[in-house]
Image (cartoon, rainbow, N blue to C red):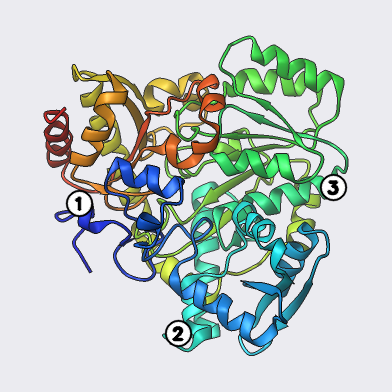
Amino acid sequence: MTDLFQNPLCNAEDLGKAIPDHELGVSVCLPLWKHVIGYEEKDPDIVSKFQSGYPRFCCPPAISRLFAAAEKEFAAEGERCLVFPRVVHAQRCIDFIQGKGRAMEWKAHDLGVAVFPAESYDTARQFWRFCGECVSTRQACDALGEHKSTVTEEEGRAANRIIRERIAELAGQRPEDVFLFPSGMAANYAVHRMLTHLFPERKTIQLDFPYVDVLKLQQKFGSGAHFIPLVKDSEYEDLRRIMEDEPLAGIFCEAPSNPLLKCVDFKRLLEIHDFTRPETPIIIDDTISTVAHADALKVADVTTTSLTKSFSGVGDVMAGSVVLSRKSHHHAAFSKFLTAHADHELWRGDAVALELNSRDFIQRANTMARNAKLLAEHLRTHPKVDRVWHAATEGGRGYEYIRREVGGYGCLFSFTLKNPDQTSPPFYDALRVCKGPSLGTNFTLACPYTLLAHYDELPWVESCGVSRWLIRVSAGLEDTQELIARFDEALAKI
């Protein structure tokens, strides 16, 4: 496997390679600006070179082969299949496409198969993307007999237990308050299902501009959502009016947000919340800050996290978590629902990999946060840089309210260049760090985030204060001065 610290996947010939460069890599290399455009426009010359992809968006080869094997075994003429970790996930997919098909247990592999008419395939893939209940590449390889896992069920259960204990200790909760899922989006989906089940016919609220699919999940499922981007200070009064007018299923926010690294003013939120609808649950996604740097449960009834990111770091396993606050007066109801309806455990091979990857989580999170802050500060003073977004400057008193006493600000920052339409592509093309989607990897990872996440809705995104030219950077464990030199080198070429 390539040493991604010294030899990042960033050159034109690296297009389509998995990051890291083996079949379990959860990212894919998009080394040139034109490759990002080509991917979004489904240019066959670009997408045909993909050897992997972020699994919710672009099925890695092993998962595609698993789908084909399922279709061969279960599908009649004119039918397609998707494969899920369990049959309950497959049934939820069938429900999403309005019952057009059937869910079956693939008993030979303990998997679930959704079988549906071919014309429903795109809709089924929307469920796969937005709900994140994805079968993993490891599990697919094991089921296909390509790379049989040597991990026993007992070892898998032990790894799951250790992961829950590790997260619980950091969060100041108990292991039974931690629930694990096959991806961060699956964790968000479980919470949303829980809220819409316990509080039916109520909308949710999304505060601040979030990661793309967190908002789309709320809009497509349940009773819909109010979106308050918090571009203007007066929008807190909009929040107050909504909360006075109607009961809500929950309030969602990120700490800090992705990609603008802003943070809701939690003191102000709590003042409005406690005065209007104190029973409304607050859900905070702390994927960017991580539990290492922030105590989101100081505010939240529930936290969600993509463990795929900094908790793992390696970039070779997907997982997510939900943590319940024991001080929440919803704790008993939430615990009962998730105990009955959550996934309970990661697949054994993924659990063992994640447990191993996360042993040095705190140390890595601290290094990545330090590198991100120093690199952001350096770029802020560069004459060719227009603006930098980093939680230390954008998070405000909201982030400081939950930041731990010695906590940092997470691994992520974003920036734009001056004359961005002319300078962004050549800068990105010249940058010598790994380039592709995802974040929280041990190696630095950059991407033109807005183009990747919002290509079909750029005017709307810009109305929310997010530039189409924004470049997002997840700082890794490289030497700080080496990282700064690489960015300066790329800036010198524009």
For disc 2, the marked residue is 149
Q: Residues within 10 Å of mark 2 (few under 14, many from 20)?
A: some
Q: Residue furthest top?
A: 234
Residue 246 seen from this side: yes
Picture coordinates of residue 214, whole percent (x, y): 61, 42
Instruction: Give the foreground label among 3 and 2.
Output: 2
In the image, 361 versus 424, the foreground residue is 424
Q: Residue at x 29, y 36 (%)?
A: 372
Q: Assign a secondary structure to mark 2.
A: loop
Q: Assign a secondary structure to mark 3.
A: helix
- Residue 141 versus residue 292 in the image, above or below: below
Q: Residues within 10 Å of mark 1 (few under 14, many from 20)?
A: some
Position of 76 with respect to 159 (left or right) is right
For disc 1, the marked residue is 11
Q: Residue at x 69, y 56 (%)?
A: 123
- Could you tell me the amino acid type at mark 1? Asn
Residue 19 seen from this side: no
For disc 3, the marked residue is 198
Q: Earlier in the sequence, mark 2 or mark 1?
A: 1
Position of 425 with respect to 464 (left or right) is left
- Could you tell me the amino acid type at mark 2? Ser
Picture coordinates of residue 121, whole percent (x, y): 66, 63
The N terminus - image quarter = bottom left
Q: Earlier in the sequence, mark 3 or mark 2?
A: 2
Position of 183 with respect to 86 (left or right) is left
Q: CA distance from mark 3 to mark 2?
A: 39 Å
Quadrant of the rendered image containing residue 195: top right
| Res 55 label | none
Q: Earlier in the sequence, mark 1 or mark 3?
A: 1
Instruction: Give the foreground label among 2 and 1.
Output: 1
